[in-house]
Amino acid sequence: MRFPPGFVWGTATSSHQVEGGNDNNDWWDWEQGEERIRDGTRSGEACGWWAGRAEDDLAEAARRGQTAHRLSLEWSRLEPREGKWNDEAFARYTRLLDAMRELGLAAMVTLNHFTLPRWVARRGSWLDPSLSRLFARYASECARRFDDRVKWWATLNEPSVLAFMGYAGRRWPPGRGSMPAAFRALRHMARAHRGAHRAIHRVLAPASVGVVMNWPRFEASRSSLLDRAVTRAQDALFGALPLRAFQPFDWLGLNYYGRYRVRFDARAPEMLFGRHVQASSIRTDETDWGEIAPEGLEEQLVRLAHLGVPLYVTENGVSDEDDRIRPDYLVGHVAAVHRAIERGADVRGYFHWSLIDNFEWAEGWSVRFGLIAVNPHTQERRVRSKSAGIYQQICMQDSVAK
């Protein structure tokens, strides 16, 4: 397989999951509640990135042939109180972005990867109609301060997932458990994206501003009309509807983990009455992350080709502590990206999730996505040699081919 000139290979992380000590946001507060985190853990010091471990981990990524990295900024650090910017936090991110440039890692920066500052949460989180204005101001300040250190700006990460988990459902903050609240939150997130897109372009005329969507492959588990109807509904809510609502964007990120087989279930209103009935799991435990289906990634990329914007696979990975599944998973999904390109999809980069093990939201530390294993108690690192070695070969051989 040969990929187009300029194709980028990288990995992805997010601030709350790796930095540690993010004690001024809604997720930190949520973690303190009883039975909210599957394994009873907390983010705590996470992977120590804020304390200085980030540069070493990113240096390892660069040594292994990666040419880009996707990370996120923690809004609660940069604006700990409304209208009060934290110069020290901006300086820390500036040093990190400068280190990435020295390592040859182009920066894809996500402005908001699920977490909200505590002061925003107290205003109603994404149910607050004024949040779009506040988010645009935050985006403008980041663009002004970080300037050309960022190659790609992503406004929001997986808005549909957040709407389902925290507003239609109760597993994530704010835990509203209301479908109308989910649609309202999505509407406000779309407005925030559009405002941030305009704000960044006002500050940085040549900026490249996109949004990151999670869009699994949804398939009806049976041929019944009800199964097909709820499958179409879930597919529309995760993909087709947000794609319209969140335009414009200069590029689009696709997060893809697997395929869902959907069956009608009148007892599941929070899932649009569609229950997932998996034949197998891409996880090494019972949690539902979809079936392994590289062909689903190919099809989703081809479906997105009509948008006429560059596409990036911004997350793709599997939880596999023993590194038994990930090697084949990696090869299969990279091959699917290549097939999508051959079919006309303008895919310009692949970011594996994740560079390192991290705090995986409501799953805590019970899942392990990293090419590098992390012990959160000792901060010890251990490279998962099989999958990390295969990904290194992919990155470096492609670089040589270019």
Image (spheres, helix red, strand yellow):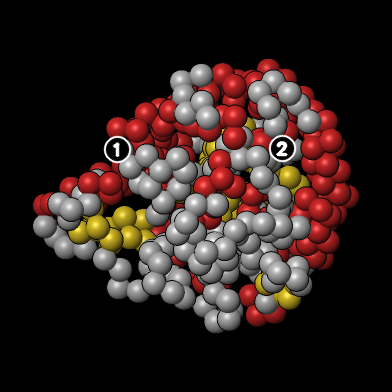
Classify the position of the N terminus by image quarter: bottom right
State the image coordinates of residue 150 (x, y, percent, origin top left).
Answer: 74, 38
State the image coordinates of residue 265 (x, y, percent, origin top left).
Answer: 17, 55
**In this image, 196 relative to 308: left or right?**
right
State the image coordinates of residue 270 (x, y, percent, origin top left).
Answer: 28, 46
Q: Secondary structure at mark 1?
A: helix
Location of mark 1 (residue): 179
| Closer-to-camera residue (42/143) | 42
What residue is at 46 percent from the left and 20 percent from the top? Answer: 129
Q: Quadrant of residue 251?
A: top right
Mark 2 and mark 1: Cα distance apart in space: 31 Å
| Closer-to-camera residue (288/219) | 288
Query: Mark on residue 77?
Result: 2
Q: Secondary structure at mark 2?
A: helix
What residue is at 68 percent from the left and 27 percent from the top? Answer: 81
**In this image, 386 relative to 333: left or right?**
right
Above or below, 209 relative to 397: above
Classify the position of the C terminus by image quarter: bottom right
**In this image, 70 relative to 294: left or right?**
right
Hey, what amino acid is under mark 2? Answer: Arg
Sequence order check, earlier mark of 2 and 1: 2
Q: Residues within 10 Å of mark 2 (few under 14, many from 20)?
A: some
Hey, what amino acid is under mark 1? Answer: Met
State the image coordinates of residue 76 (x, y, percent, origin top left).
Answer: 66, 36
